[in-house]
Amino acid sequence: MKKYQLVVRIFLIIHLLSVSFCRPLVVLAGNLENTDQDDRKISFLQENQLIQTEDGKLYTTTPSNYITHSIHAALGETQTHQRNNQTIYVDPNAHISNIDIRLSNGVREYGWYGKRINNEIALCIEPGAALNLGNNSGYTVAERNTEQMKKISLIKYYGLMVSGHTLKKELMTQILAWEQQGITPLSISGVFSMTDYQTFKSAVMKNVNYFYTSPSFDKQTINLKVGESITLTDTTHAFSNYQSLPSFVSQGLSISKKGNQLTILANKNAEATSRVEFDYDIASTFQGVPLIYQHPYTQNMMVGRLNEHRKISLTINVLKNGNARVRKVDETTKQPLAGAVFRFTTSDGKTKEITTGSDGYAAWNDLLVDTKVTIQEIKAPNGYVLNATPQTVTIKANETTTISLDNKEQLANLKVIKEDEETGSKPQGASQLVRAVYEL
């Protein structure tokens, strides 16, 4: 084991002195002026086996990057402003010792510690730098609302908050966050494998990508009859990550969401042009701007937040009117009859008298759905018998409800009496009044 640690230390020293982060390293003992503070810093670096890059960051030359001593105390530095003196708590109980991760930037993680800021999980955004120095105070905090930080925040949300926290998930979330910075794992061994990590990554990124995907029916316009329902299915599957209840719905609409399906039902009180909106489902405790915690010597950290408000909307054209119509025809020939007058009476007491045209139709249009309309003939066409039997229809949305009424022609008996022009019913001479034939 000691031989292994020696090889590891030599490897880290050579690597950090040559290519770490493509920044030249400076061992402070060769460049600092001979002051008391410089001497204290040199002693601190030597005692804790640390080296420092030009940007001031400290890197360990041992398998552990957890240092119990404070560099601020060693140098006599103080931090007075509360916002600029935040503390990152490295929880010794949030520790995975049996893990070995090789990263594409040359860093190798032997063991891992979870980080906390005000009891909230923090993610490292600077792998390889020293994790802990003393009480780990002296961090400054700033908002960082970039696309990269937003995506890392989503990874944390779906990797830990939605799926449930475990230390393994927290570490895999951390690795996936590094990937957003272009630092990928080359190998993983220990309490989980590279296969385990890839399975976790696939599940998390599926949900992350849903955030950037609009459901297939977003911004569509739907035609819907009153009393009927329609079920829409999102082919992208992103709708499953939206809230179960709409953030806005017009009156007269009933909404039901189940997974990627949305069912809409309209009643007669719905507005002709109605609207439904759904918000993306992000817990209120996670809403806000991502925060970055920076330190002159140790790892920079971030606390995830999501500041973007995503929603979808649909427009529903509610078809709520219909038509009532009657057709007048000859009883025998079924040909249309013009000139018949009908009285239309609605269930709410409105009346209208309408005369059939040459096509035999009389219609009252744009009546509210479910309205009952009684239709009765009040005047027959010339030469036909009045059919005064009333009929009642119920209005259906976006439909014309038609009844047909037929009429009989008016008939009469014809009696012809032949008389003498002068004597009337008495014939004169040899003439006769019987057996006369007439053509009609």
Image (spheres, rainbow, N blue to C red):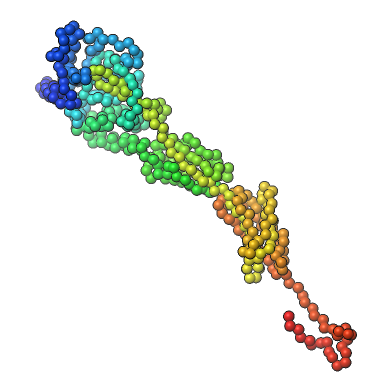
Q: Quadrant of the C terminus?
A: bottom right
Residue at 13% x, 14% y is: 30
Q: Nearer the viewer, residue 133 or 57?
A: 57
- Please identify the residue farthest to the right as the structure is shown: 423
Residue at 27% x, 28% y is: 174
Left or right, 285 with reference to 149: right
- Whether residue 243 can be seen here: no
Left or right, 398 with reference to 356: left
Residue at 64% x, 62% y is: 357
Left or right, 80 with reference to 63: right
Quadrant of residue 197 within the rendered picture: top left
Q: Is residue 347 above or below residue 84?
A: below
- Please identify the residue farthest to the top as the structure is shown: 36
Q: Is residue 201 above or below residue 48?
A: below
Q: Position of residue 105 (x, y in %)?
A: 19, 29
Q: How many marks?
A: 0
- Please identify the residue farthest to the bottom as the structure is shown: 430
Q: Position of residue 351 (x, y in %)?
A: 69, 51
Q: Is residue 439 above or below residue 103?
A: below
Q: Position of residue 306 (x, y in %)?
A: 37, 29
Quadrant of residue 232 within the rendered picture: top left
Q: Quadrant of the N terminus?
A: top left
Q: Position of residue 231 (x, y in %)?
A: 46, 46
Q: Nearer the viewer, residue 77 or 267?
A: 77
Residue at 16% x, 20% y is: 25
- Whether residue 317 can be seen here: yes
Q: Is residue 272 above or below residue 342?
A: above
